[in-house]
Amino acid sequence: MMSSATTTIAPEVLWAQRPDELYITINAPDVANPEITLTKDQLKFVGLSASSGKQFSVTLDFLKEVDPEASRQNLNSRALIFVIAKKEKGEAYWPRLLKASAGKPHFLKTDFSRWKDEDEEDEVDAPANDMDMSNFSGMGGGGMPGMGGMGGMGGMGDMMGGMGGMGGMGGMDMQALMAQMGGGAGGMDFSKFGGAGDDAADSDDGEDMPELEEAPSAPAS
């Protein structure tokens, strides 16, 4: 519970853009349970730093509309990073991030590590080099307390549970399987071929064995 003496400050906010999205970084370290709200017009963040005790709060009113459903977020120990999809794709770069034009807020800075000029045609469509999307979760719009955006994985247990019947090959009817394959490898029906083993057996049974000759008797001494 925060005390009434806690001072609320605006964290440093860095931003860059591409034709289809915005990169926004809020430098607020050690915020365990941030309150985040993203709408088509606005990004709002409130959070308490566990290490410094600072209460952070910032509201960004965008110059144009964004798409919350297609946006992503990532929280680490140093910052909150957002990849926010622009609603209108493939348009010219926004001239600024915020709707208000009466000067840029003191906390808002250009993120030169991720910025690409619009005339850099070979690179402008490429995402920022350090943006590993596997570390990001969906935002989906609305309030996002605690960054809990992974609820959609709940169905994985049911899906994996349904694979329990794969435990080995013991349940397979090999006779039925061979019948489906046409009676043998490559669809060959071996019942139409004379078995080599049977012919060999018949040949052995019908062949006369030579009679053994008696050994000559030893001459009398």
Image: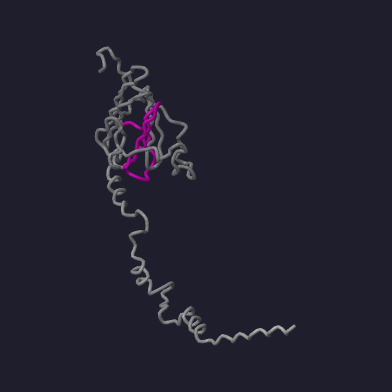
- Residue visible at 31% across and 54% down in the picture: 165
In the rendered structure, the answer to whether residue 1 lies left or right of residue 136 reads left
In magenta stretch: residue 82? yes
| Residue extending farthest right | 221
Q: Judge whether 178 appears above or below 220 on screen.
A: above
Which of 10 and 46 lies nearest the eye of the viewer?
46
- Residue visible at 30% across and 27% down in the picture: 34
Q: Is the image coloured rainbow, by chain, by secondary structure, or in one colour?
A: one colour
Give the magenta range.
Answer: 70-98
Camera sees residue 81: yes
Q: Judge whether 38 appears above or below 51 on screen.
A: below
Camera sees residue 65: no
Residue 7 sits in quarter? top left
Quadrant of the drawing holding the C terminus: bottom right
Which of 80 and 24 lies nearest the eye of the viewer?
80
Which of 94 and 211 lies nearest the eye of the viewer?
211
Residue 177 sits in quarter? bottom left
